[in-house]
Image: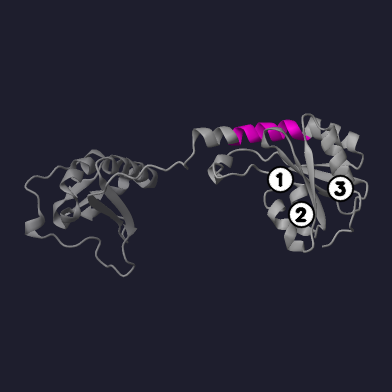
Amino acid sequence: MSGAPRTDLAVFAAGLADRLPGTWTSEYQRHALSADQFPRTEQLWDTGHVDYIVSQYVLTHDAVLHGPADQRLYVTDRPLYPHQFVVAPLAPVGTHIKPHHFARVEEPNGIAVPKHPAQAAARVAQRLLPRYEQALQTVLTNAANQPEPPHRPAPPQVDQVLTLTLYSDGALGAPYDSVPVDARMTLYAHGFQYHPHQAAFLLPTAYGDSGRALRVHGVVQQLTAKGIGVNLRHSAPTTSAALPPASPKTAPTTARTR
């Protein structure tokens, strides 16, 4: 959409700058092409109606007010409201300002103001600048304290993997040969039982779904702490046998049951 051009923006922006607390200057710019507005509007620190205006309307001009401590305010028309303008903060820029410095910092957002510079300055000073100054200081503090983005720690090295399978008959477990030696006592401790005729560790169905889920969760926690990964999977639908048949060479020398 294209808003009706205003002829008083430059005068208004200069008058607003003169009346704001501290020292402010006004930089007015007229846009020959609609794309010319983007370099400034892309820096807009607003997720409210000012952001909507700059994304929905072709703005033929705007102004940027430069104030103390690198503060910048964007000023432009409020389409369909000939007696108002909008004023919004611009986000800080610089090689030391990175995207992660804005994390969890609430946008200060802009406001609509009357076309009278004195009234507009009072509203900006009371409603906009306090939020803007607080958000700006938070970002600058973040930049000073955390110049590089945080990195999540790498997961522990996994040297072995245990795959627990939920079979079509409801059995949950793993063939004995596939269980890492260091994982066997953990399985026993969480209720898994060794079944010699199937050469496998199985978790009894008597625990119920929630009980088995809790025990599997405990197994995962303890084994991952030891560097043993745990995979959970369903058996293929075409599998007819619950577990592979026992093989004499896979039977353990001792068996512990519960």
Instruction: Kindly identify which residue carries mark 3.
Output: 10
Would you place residue 190 above or below residue 6 in this image?
Answer: above
Q: Position of residue 16 (x, y in %)?
A: 85, 38
For numbered disc 2, what is the local secondary structure? helix
Q: Could you tell me which quadrant the C terminus lies in?
A: top left
Say which element carries label 3.
helix
Disc 1 vs disc 3: which is toward the camera?
A: 3
At x 42%, y 43%, the residue is: 151
- Is residue 103 visible from the viewing direction of this image? no
- Which tag, 1 or 3, sits closer to the chain's start? 3
Discs 2/3, front:
3
Residue matched to label 2: 54
Main SS class of the magenta portion in the image: helix
Gap between marks 2 and 1 measured at Cα: 10 Å
Q: Are marks 2 and 1 in contact (CB under 8 Å)?
A: no
User: For the residue carrying disc 1, how many other residues have a C-alpha within 10 Å: few (<14), some (14-19), or many (20+)?
Assistant: many
Amino acid carrying label 3: it is Ala
Local crowd size for mark 3, using a 10 Å CA cut-off: few (<14), some (14–19), many (≥20) = many
Amino acid type of the residue tagged 2 in the rendering: Val
Residue depicted at 12% across the width and 45% down the height: 255
- Give the magenta-colored segment's residue range: 128-139
State how far apart marks 2 and 3 are (Cα). Answer: 18 Å
Within the magenta stretch, is there residue 133?
yes
| Element on which disc 1 rests | loop
**x, y percentage for residue 224?**
29, 43
Contact check, label 1 and label 3, Cβ < 8 Å: no
Residue at point 76%, 35% (across, down): 128
Residue tagged by mark 1?
46
In the rendered image, residue 85, in percent from the top left (x then y), is placed at 86, 46
